[in-house]
Image: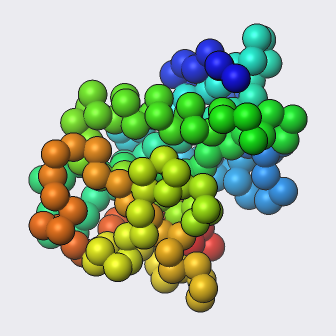
């Protein structure tokens, strides 16, 4: 299924909230997305909506992060990625990821991190980050260590870097990890 994907505007805030709310059972996720859009420490950010005709069916957000000791690297955090239930398992999430990564490459971002489903994100180029020495802002839940993932989207070598990943103020809370 081919979607129309575009950058969001301030006028899209209500639509973003609705998509996030429909996609997640957790009422905190749409609040988190809304707060991230307001958080100056999350900028620069990329926020994209996917449309099926006139209906918004997906949203993705990439926010600013940094790697301790390697502040010269440009780092982004993917969270959240939402697709409404009626449109899940149709490739929309992957289209949003690809569109976002392409925009991040244009902005010369080096690394993208995500805490997400271990069967989903590797299909889009992500690999477990902990074994490569990238430490999340807070410990991941036991058994979910491989859910903390990274992807290099520039020509850097992951093996040349390791350390503590830092995130925006809104994202920097233990309950988000």
**Which quadrant is the C terminus positioned in?**
bottom right
Figure quadrant of residue 132: bottom left
Query: Where residue 118 appears, x then y in whole percent?
Result: 58, 66
Q: Does any portion of residue 66 appear in the rendered image? A: yes
Q: Does any portion of residue 19 appear in the rendered image? A: no
**Most distant residue in the bottom direction:** 142
Query: Where residue 147 appears, x then y in whole percent?
Result: 54, 70
Q: Residue at x 28, y 52 (%)?
A: 152
Q: Residue at x 27, y 28 (%)?
A: 106
Q: Residue at x 28, y 44 (%)?
A: 153
Figure quadrant of residue 101: top left
Q: Residue at x 47, y 29 (%)?
A: 99
Query: Where residue 111 appears, x then y in whole percent?
Result: 29, 52
**Most distant residue in the top direction:** 53
Count the labels in the image.
0
Q: Is residue 90 above or below residue 140?
A: above
Q: Is residue 119 above or below residue 142?
A: above
Q: Nearer the viewer, residue 167 or 93?
A: 93
Q: Is residue 50 above or below residue 26?
A: above
Q: Is residue 166 left or right of residue 18?
A: left
Q: Is residue 107 left or right of residue 138?
A: left
**Which quadrant is the N terminus positioned in?**
top right
Query: Where residue 59 appears, x then y in whole percent?
Result: 64, 35
Q: Nearer the viewer, residue 163 or 152?
A: 152
Q: Is residue 13 left or right of residue 39?
A: right
Q: Nearer the viewer, residue 42 or 146?
A: 146
């Amino acid at each position: 299924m081919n979607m129309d994907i575009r950058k969001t505007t301030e006028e899209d805030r209500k639509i973003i909230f609705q998509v996030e709310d429909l996609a997640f059972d957790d009422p905190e996720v749409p609040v988190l997305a809304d707060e991230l859009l307001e958080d100056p420490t999350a900028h620069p950010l990329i926020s994209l909506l996917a449309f099926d005709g006139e209906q918004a069916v997906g949203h993705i957000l990439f926010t600013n992060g940094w790697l301790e000791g390697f502040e010269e690297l440009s780092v982004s955090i993917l969270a959240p990625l939402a697709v409404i239930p009626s449109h899940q398992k149709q490739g929309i999430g992957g289209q949003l990821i690809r569109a976002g990564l392409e925009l991040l490459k244009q902005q010369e971002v080096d690394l993208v991190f995500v805490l997400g489903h271990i069967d989903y994100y590797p299909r889009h180029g992500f690999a477990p980050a902990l074994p490569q020495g990238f430490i999340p802002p807070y410990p991941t839940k036991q058994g979910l260590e491989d859910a903390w993932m990274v992807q290099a989207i520039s020509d850097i070598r992951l093996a040349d870097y390791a350390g503590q990943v830092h995130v925006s103020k809104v994202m920097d809370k233990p309950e988000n990890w």
